């Protein structure tokens, strides 16, 4: 009797098949609940701000309609949204990367300023006769290095002196501002009798526009590419995993053999480098010179964007778009509703508190 011998099972067939999780009723219900919480949080913030508008004698519906028309009713406003969005994205990423390591980087404002200063210094060092592409690359490299080193100061203070990075990065913002003021009032000042500012950047070194019919420069492309890169590094690389472990439990990470000081230093320096790129984009894409208002409040707004997105790279894009839209639409409050433009910061605060307060998952009570 002939015995049939079955062929050996191939490794692919022998390997256990991964089960693809199906979307169950409970999962769909949870997704609807999360969506409802976010919608409710935004609706609640708008309702509260509407009450404040009524107290001031303005019609909330008319005010919101005017803000929407100003932000999206014309091409120049839409361009402005994306122009303002780019540095906000990079400034928020500068907070998100150290946050993964359990660090609080409040120094985006100063790192952005230093990045702009380094970009300007690179053009002065290299000279204006070089091709524009060479100058742009030089500015970018200088901004990355300067931002990383500026954040590295806070990392060194934490590692060797025990200074909390939230305090050191915040105080370094004022140091960076004074460096900027010294340069524009002294050695880099364009004219002793004019406004305190540097000479305007040559046209060849300005960031190119995406299209001839818009004002949007390639800064938004740089921001999008770096967002994808940061997301991949944090979720798909060994370094990203180690940083997450160190941020979750530093003592456990040490016992597992991880070099926690090195991870802390690298996370903060990478964050500073991202903020430095934001400063370069502001300098070479919109401002074209250093002045006393360079990068004003962008770092602090980016910090709020990061917290609004819960330190996640892709949601940062949505948060930055929202904040950029509000900053463009705020002029309609004063023009159409006779409400001071800075009232938009009240709406921003209400949105932030509502989102953080009503969309945070609740822990089950024991």
Image (cartoon, rainbow, N blue to C red):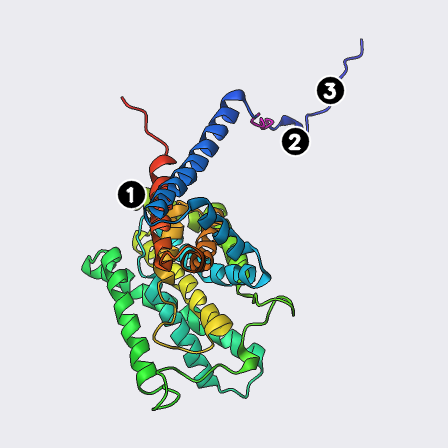
Residue hosting label 3: 6
Taking the view exactly as shown, the residue that stands out farthest to the bottom is 192
Nearest to N terminus: mark 1 or mark 3? 3
| Residue 248 or residue 200, whichever sits in front | 200
**CB under 8 Å between discs 2 and 1:** no
Instruction: Please identify the quarter of the rendering in which residue 112 is found.
Output: bottom left
Q: CA distance from mark 2 to mark 1?
A: 37 Å
Residue 49 image offset from top left, x and y in percent: 36, 45
- The residue under label 2 is 12
- Picture quarter with the C terminus: top left
Q: Residues within 10 Å of mark 2 (few under 14, many from 20)?
A: few
Q: Which label's residue is closer to the chain start, 2 or 1? A: 2
Give the residue drawn at x 47%, y 48%: 62
Q: Secondary structure at mark 2?
A: helix
| Image-based side of 22 in relation to 233, left or right | right
Q: Is residue 266 visible?
A: no
* Part of the protein shown in magenta: 16-22
Label 3–label 2 contact, CB within 8 A: no
Q: Position of residue 129 (x, y in %)?
A: 54, 88
Check disc 1 and report its element: helix, strand or loop.
helix
Q: Is residue 109 visible?
A: yes
Q: Residue at x 77, y 15 (%)?
A: 4
Judging by the rendered image, the residue that carries numbered circle 1 is 255
């Amino acid at each position: 009797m002939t015995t049939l011998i079955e062929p050996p099972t191939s490794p692919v067939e022998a390997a256990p098949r991964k089960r693809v999780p199906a979307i169950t009723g409970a999962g769909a219900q949870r997704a609807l609940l999360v969506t409802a919480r976010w919608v409710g949080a935004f609706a609640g913030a708008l309702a509260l701000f509407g009450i404040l508008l009524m107290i001031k004698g303005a019609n909330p519906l008319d005010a919101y309609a005017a803000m929407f028309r100003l932000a999206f009713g014309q091409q120049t406003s839409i361009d402005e949204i994306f122009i303002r969005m780019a540095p906000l994205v990079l400034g928020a990423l500068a907070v998100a990367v150290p946050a993964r390591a359990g660090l609080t980087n409040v120094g985006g404002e100063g790192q952005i300023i230093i990045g702009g200063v380094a970009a300007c210094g690179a053009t002065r060092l290299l000279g204006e006769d070089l091709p524009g592409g060479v100058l742009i690359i030089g500015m970018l490299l200088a901004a990355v290095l300067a931002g990383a080193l500026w954040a590295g100061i806070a990392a060194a203070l934490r590692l060797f002196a025990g200074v909390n990075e939230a305090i050191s990065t915040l105080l370094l913002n004022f140091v960076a501002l004074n460096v900027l003021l010294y340069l524009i009032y002294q050695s880099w000042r364009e004219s002793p009798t004019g406004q305190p500012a540097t000479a305007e950047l040559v046209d060849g070194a300005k960031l190119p526009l995406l299209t001839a019919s818009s004002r949007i420069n390639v800064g938004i492309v740089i921001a999008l590419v770096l967002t994808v890169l940061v997301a991949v590094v944090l979720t798909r690389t060994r370094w990203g995993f180690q940083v997450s472990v160190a941020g979750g439990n530093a003592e456990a990470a040490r016992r597992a053999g991880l070099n926690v000081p090195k991870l802390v230093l690298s996370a903060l320096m990478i964050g500073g480098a991202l903020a430095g790129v934001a400063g370069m984009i502001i300098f070479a894409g919109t401002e074209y010179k250093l002045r006393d208002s360079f990068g004003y409040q962008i770092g602090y707004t980016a910090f709020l964007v990061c917290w609004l997105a819960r330190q996640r790279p892709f949601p940062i894009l949505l948060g930055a778009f929202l904040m950029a839209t509000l900053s463009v639409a705020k002029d309609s409050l004063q023009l159409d509703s006779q409400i001071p433009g800075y009232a938009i910061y009240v709406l921003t605060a209400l949105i932030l508190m509502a989102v953080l307060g009503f969309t945070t998952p609740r822990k089950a009570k024991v």
